[in-house]
Amino acid sequence: MIGRLRSVVLDTKDPRQLASFYAGVLGGEVEAQDDTWVVLTVPTHGRLAFQLAPDHEPPRFPDPRGSQQFHLDVEVDDVDDAESKVLALGATRVIDAIGEDDFRVYRDPAGHPFCLVFSVLG
């Protein structure tokens, strides 16, 4: 092993707003170091960091010409309840995603894709 994962970092035009969104989804504590770097620490899952990228353009997904490049999977017990909550926080649903038997695809407020993952078997 060379090292340990410290953070997953997401580019965004508004680090504080995106950190607040993910705090609503995952819980945890938000700490803004300044207007360009905000960290969400979730005790059971580590850190997400949000970095100011004034020219950030969200990935186009689904897009047959390219990939989503990166996404987060968020495991939930009740996908319908979780969906209503992430939508209230500012997520948008990706309706034309393929094969959503045990997950649903969304975009966070900055346009990054993420999935709510659930078991259809209960």
Image: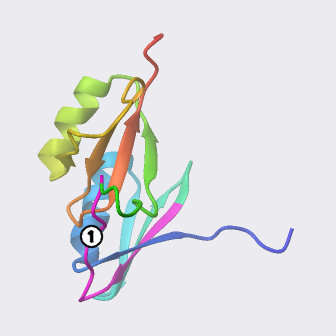
Q: Residue at x 15, y 53 (%)?
A: 90
Q: Quadrant of residue 107?
A: bottom left
Q: How far across and down, in percent of the image, does residue 112 sit? A: 32, 61
Say whether residue 102 is magenta: no
Q: What residue type is labelled 1?
A: Pro
Q: Residue at x 66, y 67 (%)?
A: 5
**Magenta segment boundaries in residue numbering:** 47-62
Would residue 102 appear left or right of 46 to someone viewing this image?
left
Q: Residue lying furthest top in this view?
A: 121
Q: Is the magenta stretch mostly helix, strand or loop?
A: loop
109 and 22: which is toward the camera: 109
Q: Residue at x 23, y 67 (%)?
A: 110
> From the image, which quarter does the N terminus lie in?
bottom right
Q: Is residue 94 above or below residue 102?
A: below
Residue that label 1 marks: 58
Q: Residue lying furthest right in this view?
A: 1
Q: How far across and down, in percent of the image, does residue 23 sit? A: 33, 55
104 and 89: which is toward the camera: 104
